[in-house]
Image (cartoon, rainbow, N blue to C red):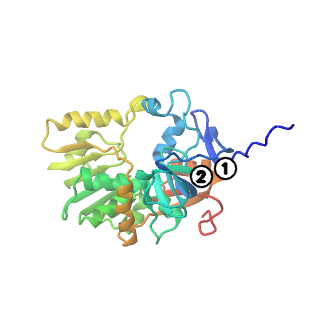
């Protein structure tokens, strides 16, 4: 008697990585489709986007991050964290979401693929007025900007706000959110991106190639530092006496990365009148709902510089790392005809 036939393993295409290094470590291969846990949903991916954290994880830097992601090699091989797509299956404990819902979320890993799983508490319904690619540009970058502006800086109408790195993924949302909160916004960026930052609503723009924002006479109630290329003392000089410096990045070498600068700021904060705050954004479905409402109202719009098909993800990351990106770089999945490679 022949052996019983085993059910076929469900597979998918994904961008994977089995060792740390450069873009040559990325592979476009066939892997097993993930299965959602009781508090998760399975998403058929329509869009994903690239963040600085993706590039750092590919390199395995800073080394301290390997304590969470794998010491010698990535514990989870599929890359990508931002996702927008359609729910294919729902875990037993999930409430408020159903098969067929269009959603977006931040996942632990795995959005550069045909399918991924997301925890329901990190999930929100996709804004109806934007495409999947645009929705995929939102989760990490816009949540970071929202939590930085609203929760850490506590911006109020009339505040003067400077955003260092205003044309990048987080910066493009930070400019729009600060304007929505009634602030007077100054964006710092390269010459090539000045008009783009103005188009986001910035009241003033500074070209960092010709002007040092820390050396002028202007003083700001809030500095949102997304670059981390200036010493704390220089940033403080550009703040008002009781202003707030929000740090979301920083130099610090291959071992600790931005953590060293953030720890220094937290220590100094105890001895000065200014507020020096490190931002560690947290994935939140509730905040994605807030952002959905702002997007539906037209208050903020996800700017997409370019979109690439899944197989060209390494090239998309190369562009992200080497070029002066305006907003976000997205990945489109499953040949969605509305979102072609630009």
Residue 330's disc number = none
Residue 57 visible here: yes
Of residues 51 and 2, the one nearer the viewer is 2
Residue occupying image coordinates x 59% and y 66%: 339
329 with respect to 248 (left or right): right
Q: Check disc 1 and report its element: helix, strand or loop.
A: strand
304 with respect to 308 (left or right): left
198 with respect to 42 (left or right): left
Dividing the picture into quarters, in which one does residue 205 lie?
bottom left
Residue at far front of view: 1
Residue occupying image coordinates x 45% and y 50%: 93
Q: Is residue 52 above or below residue 221?
A: above
Of mark 2 and mark 1, the one earlier in the sequence is 1
Labels 2 and 1 touching (C-beta < 8 A): yes
Residue 115's disc number = 2
Q: Check disc 2 and report its element: helix, strand or loop.
A: strand
Residue 12's disc number = 1
């Amino acid at each position: 008697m022949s052996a019983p036939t085993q059910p076929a393993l469900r597979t998918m295409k994904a961008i994977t990585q089995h060792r740390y290094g450069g873009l040559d470590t990325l592979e476009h291969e066939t892997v097993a489709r993930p299965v959602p846990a009781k508090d998760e949903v399975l998403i058929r991916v329509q869009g994903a986007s690239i963040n600085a954290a993706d590039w750092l994880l590919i390199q395995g830097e800073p080394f301290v991050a390997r304590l969470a992601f794998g010491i010698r090699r990535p514990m989870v091989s599929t890359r990508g964290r931002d996702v927008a797509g359609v729910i294919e299956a729902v875990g037993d404990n999930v409430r408020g979401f159903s098969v067929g819902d269009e959603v977006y979320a931040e996942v632990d890993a795995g959005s550069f693929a045909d399918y991924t799983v997301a925890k329901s508490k990190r999930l929100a319904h996709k804004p109806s007025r934007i495409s999947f690619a645009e929705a995929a540009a939102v989760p990490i970058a816009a949540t970071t900007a929202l939590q930085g502006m609203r929760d850490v800086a506590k911006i109020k109408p009339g505040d003067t706000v400077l955003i260092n790195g205003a044309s990048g993924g987080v910066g493009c949302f930070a400019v729009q959110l600060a304007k929505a909160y009634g602030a007077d916004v100054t964006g710092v960026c390269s010459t090539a991106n000045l008009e783009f930052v103005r188009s986001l609503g910035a009241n003033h723009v500074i070209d960092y190639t010709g002007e040092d924002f820390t050396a002028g006479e202007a003083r700001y109630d809030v500095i949102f530092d997304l670059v981390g290329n200036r010493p704390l003392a220089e940033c403080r000089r550009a703040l008002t006496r009781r202003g707030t410096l929000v740090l979301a990045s920083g130099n610090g070498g291959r071992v600790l990365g931005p953590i060293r600068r953030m720890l220094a700021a937290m220590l100094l904060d105890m001895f000065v009148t200014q507020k020096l705050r490190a931002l560690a954004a947290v994935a939140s479905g509730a905040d994605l709902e807030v952002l959905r409402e702002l997007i539906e109202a037209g208050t903020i719009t996800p700017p997409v510089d370019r979109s690439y098909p899944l197989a060209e993800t390494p090239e998309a990351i190369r562009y992200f790392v080497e070029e002066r990106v305006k907003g976000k770089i997205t990945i489109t999945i499953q040949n969605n005809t509305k979102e072609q490679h630009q």
